[in-house]
Image: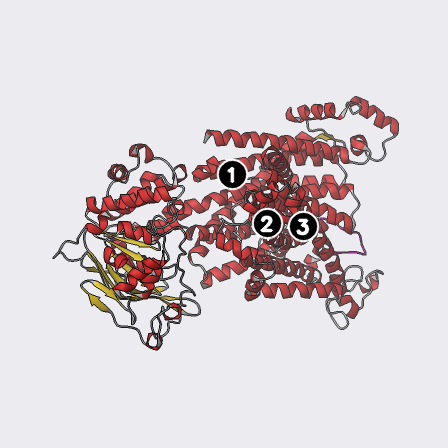
């Protein structure tokens, strides 16, 4: 696990600093509290994984950090990218941030690219819009970036159309277009979910390499614990719009504290899992974010839930960078028991 | 004529949407449709017009067979809410009788068009290859000839009557559902359940009917609704040109044609009622069709 | 692109051949055969026999078809005994007038419909959108002849602004009396605008929902750049194809309009031929119009392929 071995640079200010972020989405008949009181940081060269089930708010979080929230969504709190506050900026000001300070890669490469425009034009778009580059300059920068993301014969690819490329190649093109202005922060929202397993591995390795090469901070949003395990330095576990647990990847995987994290880990297939073992499942469904209750959102599905869990939100406990909010955190022996139970 | 007909087709696959569609046997789409107020109003209007035409005469008796020239072109007054026409028929009663013919032909033609079109298109789409190519070229060729021209020709050869009109309108209208269902069949034939049926040795006609057609029921229903709207427009056009059913039978198009002669005299009750009736009916069915399309979640464009 | 062109053109040729077969079939569908149809109901059996011999109608059907087809391709569309003129010369006189009317109306309709539809999609669900949607929905549900009648009633009868009858005479006469062209053009335009603005609106809305819009936004593109640099071009493709598909309907609408306004085009010609049972003329019109729409549709598809490269690898429409 190369990523887990890397330590963050001490002393440098974090590239991304989020404090108390709330995102509310106004629907015709209700208001969905998609993100509630989220705080996190990412430093240069570091990769933070944001993991959680579908509907937990991680995609909304990703959009908010990229300045791409739809008009119905309102963000409050603080998002600082490279020291610059994003919350409260006008559309025009946000536009200057997008693509230039923050790059974002979306899930589906098949539909992310405009089918009627050539690859070269789309990759160079951000450079022309944000840095005023000429067509020729953008074109050669695009070719260079395509080479960097591992596309063979980049100059030939410039004039092709998206439908002429495979899924993996298209995703590389999308990544290239996000990175063309060498942003400080790259947000990747489920970048490999739509790809086959082999391509997935290649793309994730690409992220690892780029993170080092370009000195970027990377945010990897995913529901796949396997992706998190192999390619992130730190993890942020999200449930129902809130932070459940966060810490270094190695710590989270070997000593999870929040019941939800434990349950998540118990449900994935690991190398050590014996053949006949049954994978754990989490009963129930995620809560309705338009009507959040008073206590811990995971309580209805939690095996260890008690009265205080449903009446009041647990305060966060912090242990040397490892933070969790749970009234009944898993003890170290229990984590061993989880791997035992899988035998 | 109807663009909706030409272009409405199922959108890109989405397994969640698919599952919903499968479960829609009577369920979800009905509720979604009922939530659409405009569509419900349209449905109510359509039903009201049906009742007006078929049940109305039972309450409002007029003589629609014998002409009474002494009563010609009287303006609306007591006993005759919409006046009389050029040969003395009561206009309101005429409207009802006209409605019967229009709706009979429209529904009949829509049925013919949908049945013929679905069978043709499903067969072409399911088998694919050269057969598909040929069958679709035939559709293209028939589409290339404007329906009205074809109808003009057929109407002069065959004596106009309600069954004949149904056949003639249906024959030009089946092309669009054929195209639509062919597109559906093309995408459905690679589904697992179709492949499974094939492997089990189920014969093609059964597969086509039981799997492909039943899973395109949304598209078929939507198109059928638009077919009714279109048929009304087409029938009124032919009748307007004088090639519809012979008197004393009538329909709104023929009434408009008669009324046209009197536009300069200002006899508004001879033109506006049938005109408004046509627009109202077509509008109602178009709105219902739109509502159904939304309820089934169908794409409005890709052909 | 060339592969696409080849494939599409060969498809068009097949369709044209099928159209000719259909027309030929219609000719022989007539009761009593083409002889009776052409000579009229007063023809005696010996007239018919002579006619048949003279025109090779006693040969096997495929041979007849071949003769007929070669005749058509060399410009011989038959002879109208009713009007005492060759069908080809009648068509040559009338076709340009119809083409002129249709062309002006369609161009005008597109110039209005596309911006309107675009505007509607961008201002979706606001007052302007709802108002226009309602109007187009009503217009779209109104038969062309009713629109014509209303226009006549309001503009010609009550306001005396324009004449109710179209200009008669030769092609150049059309230009001498532009006022008389107003109502016919307006009728076809109104009907076409209703349909096309609805379609453009849907097309633009569909494009706005696409993921690439989000990606362009993430590069820092403004609304204007997204709308005009990305969406417009992508939304235009299907509209162009629709134009090709819609040609037969436009012709039908033109036919009605010519009838109402007494416009001397091929629509009126066909109608008069129908009522006087002048079958050669009717079928001649069908052949010419059929061929024109096939070619028109082909051109529209090519236009779409120019706008959208994905179309070039697909098989065209059906």
Badge 3 crowding class, 10 Å Cα cut-off, few under 14, some 14 to 19, many 20 or more, is: many
Residue A92 quadrant = bottom left
Whole-number angstrom distance, CA of label 1 to CA of label 3: 25 Å
Q: Residue furthest left?
A: A11
**Viewer-proximal residue, A208 or C6?**
A208
**Viewer-proximal residue, C58 or A165?**
A165
Q: Which residue is mark 1?
A: C300
Whole-number angstrom distance, CA of label 2 to CA of label 1: 19 Å
Indicate which disc, 3 or 2, sits on the residue closer to the N terminus: 2
| Image quarter of the C terminus of chain C | top right
Determine the secondary structure under disc 1.
helix
Residue A88 quadrant = bottom left
**Viewer-proximal residue, B75 or B61?**
B61
Chain to which the residue tagged by mark 2 belongs: B
**Viewer-proximal residue, B29 or C34?**
B29
Query: What residue appears at the point 75 percent right and 26 percent down from the top-left corner?
Result: C61
Q: Are marks 2 and 1 in contact (CB under 8 Å)?
A: no
Residue B286 quadrant = bottom right
Q: What is the basis of the colouring in this image?
A: secondary structure
| Image quarter of the N terminus of chain C | top left
Q: Position of residue A100 (x, y in %)?
A: 24, 50
Determine the secondary structure under disc 3.
helix
Q: Which residue is mark 3?
A: B234
Q: Which residue is mark 2?
A: B5
Q: Is residue A183 visible?
A: no
Query: What residue appears at the point 55 percent right and 55 percent down from the top-left corner?
Result: B21
B246 is within the stretch colored magenta: yes
Chain to which the residue tagged by mark 1 belongs: C
Query: What residue appears at the point 50 percent right and 55 percent down from the top-left corner?
Result: B17
- Tell us which disc is closer to us: 3 or 2: 2
* Disc assigned to residue B83: none
Q: Which residues are magenta?
A: B240-250
């Amino acid at each position: 696990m190369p990523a887990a071995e890397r330590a963050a640079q001490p002393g440098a200010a974090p590239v991304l600093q989020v404090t108390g972020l709330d995102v509310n989405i106004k629907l015709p008949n209700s208001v969905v509290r998609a993100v509630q009181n989220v705080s996190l940081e990412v430093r240069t060269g570091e990769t933070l994984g944001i993991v959680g089930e579908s509907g937990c708010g991680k995609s909304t979080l990703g959009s908010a950090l990229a300045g791409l929230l739809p008009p119905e969504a309102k963000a409050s709190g603080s998002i600082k990218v490279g020291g610059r506050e994003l919350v409260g900026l006008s559309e025009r000001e946000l536009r200057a941030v997008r693509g230039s300070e923050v790059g974002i890669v979306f899930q589906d490469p098949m539909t992310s690219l405009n089918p009627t425009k050539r690859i070269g034009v789309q990759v160079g778009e951000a450079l022309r819009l944000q840095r005023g580059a000429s067509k020729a300059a953008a074109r050669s920068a695009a070719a260079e970036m395509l080479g960097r993301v591992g596309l063979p014969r980049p100059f030939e690819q410039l004039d092709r159309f998206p439908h002429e490329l495979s899924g993996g190649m298209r995703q590389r093109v999308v990544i290239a277009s996000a990175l063309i202005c060498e942003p400080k922060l790259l947000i990747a929202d489920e970048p490999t979910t739509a790809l086959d397993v082999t391509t997935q591995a290649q793309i994730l390795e690409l992220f690892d390499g780029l993170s080092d090469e370009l000195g970027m901070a990377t945010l990897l949003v995913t529901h796949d614990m396997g992706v998190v395990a192999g390619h992130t330095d730190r993890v942020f576990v999200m449930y129902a719009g809130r932070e459940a647990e966060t810490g270094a990847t190695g710590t989270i995987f070997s000593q999870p504290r929040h019941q939800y994290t434990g349950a998540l880990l118990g449900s994935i297939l690991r190398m050590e899992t014996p053949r006949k073992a049954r994978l754990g499942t989490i009963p129930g469904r995620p809560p309705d974010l338009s009507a959040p209750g008073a206590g811990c959102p995971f309580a209805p599905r939690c095996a260890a839930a008690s009265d205080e869990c449903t009446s009041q939100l647990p305060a966060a406990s912090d242990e040397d960078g490892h933070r969790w909010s749970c009234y009944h955190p898993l003890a170290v022996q229990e984590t061993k028991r989880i791997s035992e139970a899988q035998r | 004529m109807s663009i909706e007909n030409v272009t409405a087709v199922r959108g890109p696959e989405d397994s969640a949407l698919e599952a919903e569609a499968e479960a829609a046997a009577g369920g979800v789409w009905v509720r979604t449709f009922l939530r659409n107020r405009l569509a419900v109003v349209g449905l109510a209007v359509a039903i009201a017009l049906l009742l007006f035409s078929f049940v109305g005469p039972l309450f409002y008796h007029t003589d629609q067979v014998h002409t009474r020239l002494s009563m010609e072109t009287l303006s609306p007054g007591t006993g005759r809410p919409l006046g009389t026409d050029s040969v003395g028929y009561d206009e309101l009663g005429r409207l009802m009788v006209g409605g019967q013919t229009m709706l009979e032909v429209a529904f009949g033609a829509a049925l013919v068009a949908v049945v013929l079109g679905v069978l043709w298109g499903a067969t072409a789409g399911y088998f694919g290859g050269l057969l598909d190519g040929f069958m679709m070229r035939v559709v293209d060729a028939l589409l290339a000839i404007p329906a009205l021209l074809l109808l003009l020709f057929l109407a002069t050869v065959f004596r106009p009557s309600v069954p004949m009109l149904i056949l003639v309108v249906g024959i030009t209208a089946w092309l669009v559902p054929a195209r639509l269902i062919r597109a559906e069949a093309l995408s459905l034939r690679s589904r697992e359940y179709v492949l499974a049926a094939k492997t089990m040795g189920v014969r093609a006609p059964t597969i086509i009917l039981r799997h492909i057609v039943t899973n395109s029921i949304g598209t078929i229903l939507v198109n059928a609704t638009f077919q009714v709207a279109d048929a009304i427009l087409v029938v009124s056009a032919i009748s307007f040109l004088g090639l519809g059913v012979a008197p004393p039978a009538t329909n709104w198009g023929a009434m408009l044609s008669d009324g046209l002669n009197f536009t300069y005299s200002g006899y508004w009750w001879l033109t506006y009622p049938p005109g408004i009736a046509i627009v109202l009916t077509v509008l109602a069915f178009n709105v219902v069709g739109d509502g159904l399309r939304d309820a089934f979640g169908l794409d409005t464009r890709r052909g | 692109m060339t592969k696409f062109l080849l494939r599409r053109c060969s498809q068009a040729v097949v369709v044209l051949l099928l159209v000719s077969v259909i027309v030929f079939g219609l000719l022989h569908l007539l009761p009593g055969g083409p002889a009776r149809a052409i000579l009229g109901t007063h023809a005696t059996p010996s007239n018919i026999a002579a006619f048949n011999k003279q025109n090779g109608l006693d040969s096997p059907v495929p041979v007849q078809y071949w003769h007929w087809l070669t005749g058509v391709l060399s410009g011989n569309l038959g002879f109208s005994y009713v009007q005492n003129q060759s069908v080809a010369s009648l068509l040559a006189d009338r076709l340009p007038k119809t083409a002129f009317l249709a062309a002006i109306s369609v161009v005008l309709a597109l110039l209005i419909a596309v911006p309107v539809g675009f505007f509607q999609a961008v201002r979706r669900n606001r007052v302007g959108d709802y108002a226009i949607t309602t109007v187009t929905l009503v217009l779209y549900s109104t038969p062309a002849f009713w629109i014509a009648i209303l226009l006549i009633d309001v503009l010609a009868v009550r306001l005396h602004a324009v004449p109710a009858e179209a200009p008669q005479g030769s092609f150049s006469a059309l230009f001498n009396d532009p006022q008389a062209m107003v109502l016919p053009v307006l009728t076809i335009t109104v009907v076409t605008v209703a349909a096309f603005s609805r379609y453009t609106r849907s097309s633009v809305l569909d494009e706005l929902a696409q993921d690439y819009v989000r990606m362009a936004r993430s590069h820092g593109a403004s609304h204007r750049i997204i709308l005009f640099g990305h969406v417009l071009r992508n939304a235009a493709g299907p509209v162009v194809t629709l134009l090709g598909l819609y040609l037969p309907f436009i012709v039908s609408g033109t036919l009605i309009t010519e009838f109402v306004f007494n416009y001397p085009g091929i629509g009126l010609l066909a109608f008069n031929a129908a009522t006087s049972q002048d079958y050669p003329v009717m079928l001649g019109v069908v052949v010419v119009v059929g061929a024109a729409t096939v070619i028109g549709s082909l051109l529209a598809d090519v236009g779409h392929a120019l706008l959208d490269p994905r179309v070039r690898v697909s098989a065209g429409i059906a």
